[in-house]
Image (cartoon, rainbow, N blue to C red):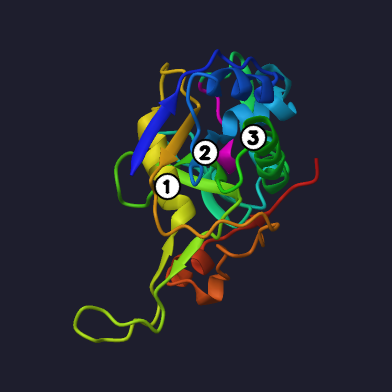
Amino acid sequence: MKVTAIKTRPLIPPQDDLLSVIKQSFLKYKVKEKSIIIITSKVVSIWKGDCVKINKIKKDKLVEQEADLYLESTHPKYDVMLTIKNNILIPTAGIDESNANGYYILWPKKPFECAKEIYEFIKKEFKLKNFGVIISDSHTTPLRAGIMGIGISYYGFYPLRDYRNKKDIFGRKLKMSQTNIVDSLSASAVYAMGEGAEQTPMAIIEDVGNIKFTSQKPRKDFLKIKPDDDIYEPVLKGAKWKKRKNK
């Protein structure tokens, strides 16, 4: 598997043209069939204008408006609220201030529709037939230092590799195992793209293997698990979540 981070010009909040940046940047790289293209959610949000001037609202109030569920208390050391948005456990509803030039950058309001629009643009512009698009973001893991990547939406391929009812090397039938392709590839791409001033908000992953490509609209619930079925249910249900406040 080969991961290549793509250098671009800066995309400037509150709104900028991502598609022209993709076209310009990809002219330097020959995108192969069966590649997966990763794009950070931040530049997608800038493309769609999902940005709020910092001096217009307090961050905690904005988090309460953007999160589906949130915990009212903030971490005293990091000033971070724990939230759930789009069925993903994420700090501060994914709102980011880094590389934002005085704006809060929100998550894209319609991430799956954005992934499809980017997919259709690349398909037409670069004459590709079998490839995928992932919109990614950085993510923390409880009890682990550092961040890694997660996919918030995707298009063009099936997101899971299913091992259930298959046998391991000793003949034991697997009951639960499925590989989350979206998050696995996002983690490798986010590592390659970096978190600081690298100016590489996109990556191309080649030679992935074992990917089932499809141009059909993805089901948004493929990667979702209900709290009752989640192995972290005691933690998730034990927290005093509050519902989103009206904007």
Residue 247 appears in the picture as rendered: yes
Q: Nearer the viewer, mark 3 or mark 1?
A: 3
Kind of residue at disc 3: Ile
Q: Magenta residues, as a range?
A: 92-98
Give the CA separation, mark 2 to mark 1: 10 Å
The residue depicted at 66 percent of the width and 17 percent of the height is: 13
Give the CA separation, mark 3 to mark 1: 19 Å
Q: Quadrant of residue 119?
A: top right
Give the CA separation, mark 3 to mark 2: 10 Å
Q: Looking at the picture, does residue 9 appear above or below residue 2?
A: above
Residue 64 appears in the picture as rendered: no
Kind of residue at disc 1: Leu
**Residue 96 part of the magenta-drawn span:** yes
Q: Secondary structure at mark 2?
A: strand
Who comes first in sequence, dot 3 or dot 1?
A: 3
Who comes first in sequence, dot 3 or dot 2?
A: 2
The residue under label 3 is 122
Q: Secondary structure at mark 3?
A: helix
* Residue 73 percent location from the top left of the image: 53, 45
Q: Secondary structure at mark 1?
A: helix
Task: Find residue 37 and name its label.
Answer: 2
Kind of residue at disc 2: Ile
Task: Find residue 185 and name its label.
Answer: 1
The image quadrant where one finds the N terminus is top left
